[in-house]
Image (spheres, rainbow, N blue to C red):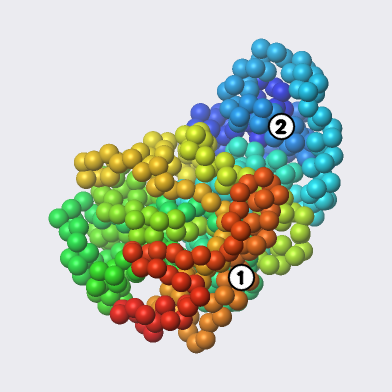
Amino acid sequence: MTTKSLGNPFDGDQSLIHAKTCGCPQCQPGQDVPSVSLNMERNSGGVDADSPADSEAMMDRAIESAVVRSVFAHNDHSRRSFMKMMGAGTAAALLGSVFPMDKAKAAVKESLGKLEKTKLNVGFVPITCATPIIMAHPLGFYERYGLDVTVTKTAGWAVARDKSLAGEYDASHMLTPMPLAMTMGAGSTPEPFIMPAVENINGQAIVLHVDHKDKRDPKQWKGFKFGVPFEYSMHNFLLRYYLAENGIDPDKDVQIRVVPPPEMVANLRAGNLDGYLSPDPFNQRAVWEKVGFIHMLTKDIWEGHPCCAFACSQRFATENPNTYGALLRAIIDATQYSNNHENRKEIAEAIAPKNYLNQPVPVIQQVLTGYYADGLGEIQNVPDRIDFDPFPWHSMGVWILTQMKRWGYIDGDVDYRGIAEQVYLAGETGKLMEDMGYAAPDKTYKTHTIMGKTFDPASPEEYARSFAIGRV
C-alpha cells in the first residue's frame, strides 16, 4: 500500500487524501486506530517502492504534491482523472515545461532551512475546532513543508496538557486559555508555552436536553447541571459570562462539571447533564440523536470569539526553530484553506473517519457549512457558525485573563498585557501571514463586544472587577 499523502501526485491510481471512502486500514470502519502516521514503513515492515526514501526525497515529493494540488485547486478527483488520461510521465513533463519545479524545490528548502527533526507527534481532541490540525494530515499540508506528522487522538484536555508538559507531544491542539494557564502554573506546574495561531473562531453552542424546550429563559435554569470540556476553556468562561449576565451565579445557582467532549451526548441522554456548552460536532450530534436542542450559538454571545488554538512549549520552538517554522506554516495554510467555505464539504469528508472525528459526514457538514437542524423543528443557515482565523489577538488573551481573575482561577496582581504578549505571538504570526501572502491585521489589540458590552483591553483590572457576579 502506498503512503497516501506522500503518494506520487502524477499517479492517477493514487489518492492523496484520506476521505470517508478511503480504502486504507486506518480509515475503514471497525479499525480501531487512535492515530495515524505517515511513516514510510508500513504493514509489511518494508518501504513502499513509490514512497520517498529519505527526508530529502520526502521534501521533494511534498513540493511536487503541493504544486500539483494547487494546479487542480486541491480537487483530487480532477487530478486523478487528468493523470489517468495523460499518463504520469506525460503529465509530469507537461507541468515541468511551464513550471520550474527544480527551482521551486531549491527555493522552498532554502527559505525553510534544514529541519532539526521531521517526525513529529501532534495531539488533537476530536472536535471540529481542531479542523486545521486534523485536515492538514489527510490533505497533505504537513508534507508540503517536509514534515512527517503523526496526529494523535486525545481523550480530553487534561491529557493533552499533561502529554504536552511531558514532551510526548511536540505540539498540540489546545483551548486558547490553556497556554496562558500553563505558563502561569494555573492548574499545573508552570512552563512557558506559546500560542502562535488560533484554530477557530465561533464554533460552539449551548445545548439543552429536549425535556427543557419550555425553559429557554436562563433565569429558569437554577439547579441545572452543565458540562464544559475543561476549566481553562472558552466554553467555561463563555457559559459563566452568559449565566451571570442573566442573573445566575455559576458557582452557586448551577453546577458546572468538566466532561470530555466525546462523553457530552451520553451524559445528556442519561440525565447526568441538563445541558452543556461544548465544542462541535457534539452540539449537532445531540440534535442528530434527538436528545438535545441548540439553545444558542456562542457567536451570539461574542461574535468572532476565539476557541481552540495551536500551541507548543517555548522550549520546542527554541530548540527546533526551523521545524517549528515549518509546522506553523502548515497550520496557517490549513487554517486559511479551512476558512474558505468552498472547501468545507471536502474537509468534512476528510476528517470524518474513525481515526479522526469518527462522526457521520452529515453531522460535520452541518457544523462546517452552518446549514443545520436546530432540534426545535427549524433549519438554520448561519455560514459563520464556525470560522477559521489564525491571528492570535493580544486583546483576546487579555480578556481571557480577566475572566480567570474574575472567577478565582488566578489571584493577586496580574500582568495582563505582559502575559498575553508572551504567550500569544500576534506580531510574529502577523508577519509570517504576510510573508505567506495572507492578509494580517496591522495591530494586535482591539476592543471586543460581548453581549452588548464593550471590553477595552487597556483597563483589564477594572473590567474584571466591574461585574455584579464574580469572585473578586
Q: Which residue is mark 2?
A: 67
Q: What SS does tag 1 mark?
A: helix
Of residues 157 and 430, the one drawn nearer to the viewer in this rendering: 430
Q: Is residue 374 left or right of residue 6?
A: left
Q: Judge whether residue 402 can be spotted in this image.
A: yes
| Relative height, residue 334 to residue 397 (above, below) | above
Among the 4 quarters of the image, the one containing residue 188: bottom right
Among the 4 quarters of the image, the one containing residue 234: bottom left
Instruction: Report, in whole angstroms, how far the alpha carbon at label 2 lies from the one at label 1.
Output: 36 Å
Of residues 183 and 152, the one drawn nearer to the viewer in this rendering: 183
Q: Is residue 109 left or right of residue 413?
A: right
The single residue placed furthest to the bottom in the displayed view is: 412
Q: Is residue 163 left or right of residue 435?
A: left
Tell me the kind of residue under disc 1.
Glu
Quadrant (top left/top right/bottom left/bottom right) for the C terminus: bottom left
Q: Which residue is mark 1?
A: 421
- Residue sitting at x 37%, y 80%: 466
- Residue sitting at x 34%, y 78%: 467
Q: Say whether disc 2 or disc 1 marks the residue closer to the N-terminus.
A: 2
Q: Judge whether residue 263 can be spotted in this image.
A: no
Percent coordinates x, y for residue 247 in the rendering: 24, 73
Q: Is residue 332 left or right of residue 281?
A: right
